[in-house]
Image (cartoon, rainbow, N blue to C red):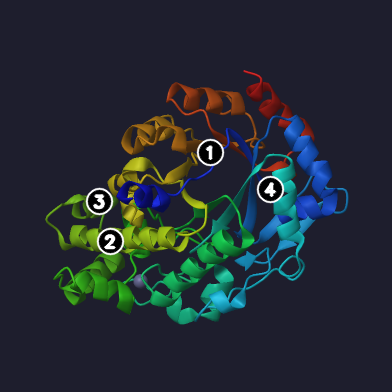
Amino acid sequence: MIFESVLEAEKTMVAMPARAIRTFVWDFADEGVHEVLGRLADSGVNGVHLALACHGGRYYCPHNPKRALVHAPDGALYFQPLLSCYDEIKPRVHPEFGSGAFVARLIESMREYDMIATAWVTLFNNQSLSLAFPECTMVNALGDRLEGTLCPAHPAVRGYAQALVEDLAHRVGVDMIELQDFAFPSHDQFIGARWVDVPVGQGLGYLLSLCFCEHCRRRAEELNLEVDDLAQRVERMLHRALAGDLSERRLNDEIADPYNSLARYAEARAGTITTLVDELNDATDGSHAGLQLVLAEEPDDAWRWGIALHTLRQRMLRATLQPGRGPAPRPTFVSRYAEVLQLGRDLAVDIPLGVPHTDDYSPAGAIQAALESGIDHFVFSHYGLVPLDMLDWIDALARR
Ligand SMILES: [Zn+2]
């Protein structure tokens, strides 16, 4: 009997799709649900990551039959949320797709094509919620609000993330929930243009990104840290570094010093994110949905944003590694994550299809590098933003 109840308690998640692709709701609405799903199935795709809470912006859509440009508001939901799930922070919904049953029907249709349905959601980089709830926005040591970010230590922000996960897992009924921006945001993640005429290196950027809101302070105080002293120190360092009086090297030495109170503050931040991930995982209990975390930072820098990789490994979550689309290749990104996380078949690599192919980057090269690290699950990006012939890459890969 005890054995049976243990089995019942264990969640059976669907297998991770081998070849998934990122999509937007408008791809299906404009091109036709069966048209798109049929095309994807023919290309060897067996999973769809559907952006259901997403960054805004201007999207260039080369094969959309109705429009070449899509403008999307920031931080909106692309499905009809059950508002009673949400407490203090009520979600912002997309004016066209935030109501009605389109997404519910779309997910049902994915099942007809044996596609695994993953909700792809962006959490804490959210301009519209940050503007609507300024008290939930991160605040640096100088007292400046980091507009566009939500602080993961704020109880209302955590409540919003939990409600979103619960809504998607229990009501929308997706198979997986992929969380992008689930940790402390960086100062340089901003939707608007940034005007920066002074060098902001990694060290200064880190200090500018440290949140000293009342909730972050309280969590650090629980670790017996003198937070006021630390905040004043960071404030002085910021002033001097911005004025060019404190070198990036000195800053990095201070940050790397394990006996410095900055290191203890990083510990508190890691606790904030680890407990949040646990709360979000709990929010999926009773559903068959699981969590998949998007890891986009260099593996050895993940701690800067509160991501403690060893604790994630213990929790046996899934992850998407996102080496990115920058011009500089990150040769050890995937192999280092594979080594640290040891998640085997629960790891996927994001493969951008549409970036300019250079000597340093091609989808084939990125796929080969992942295979050499023992990873054979891929999330291609993005269906609606690349020419259709790019789907041939997936087809070719699926036939390996
Ligand atoms: Zn905070």
Q: Mark 4 or mark 1, which is nearer the start of the sequence?
A: 1
Q: In the rendered structure, are the residues bearing label 1 and label 4 in contact, judged by CB atoms less than 8 Å apart?
A: no
Q: Mark 1 or mark 3, which is nearer the start of the sequence?
A: 1
In the picture of the structure, the residue carrying the numbered disc 4 is 23
Q: In the rendered structure, are the residues bearing label 3 and label 2 in contact, judged by CB atoms less than 8 Å apart?
A: no
Q: Secondary structure under badge 4? A: strand
In which image quadrant can residue 144 be found?
A: bottom left
- What x and y, as percent, mark residue 373? 42, 25
**Mark linked to residue 271:** 2
Q: Is residue 303 left or right of residue 298?
A: left
Q: Residues within 10 Å of mark 3 (few under 14, many from 20)?
A: some
Pair 3/2: label in front: 2
Pair 2/1: label in front: 1
In the picture of the structure, the residue carrying the numbered disc 3 is 252
Q: Residues within 10 Å of mark 1 (few under 14, many from 20)?
A: many
Q: In the rendered structure, are the residues bearing label 3 and label 1 in contact, judged by CB atoms less than 8 Å apart?
A: no
In the picture of the structure, the residue carrying the numbered disc 1 is 16
Q: CA distance from mark 4 to mark 3?
A: 39 Å
- What x and y, as percent, mark residue 361? 56, 29
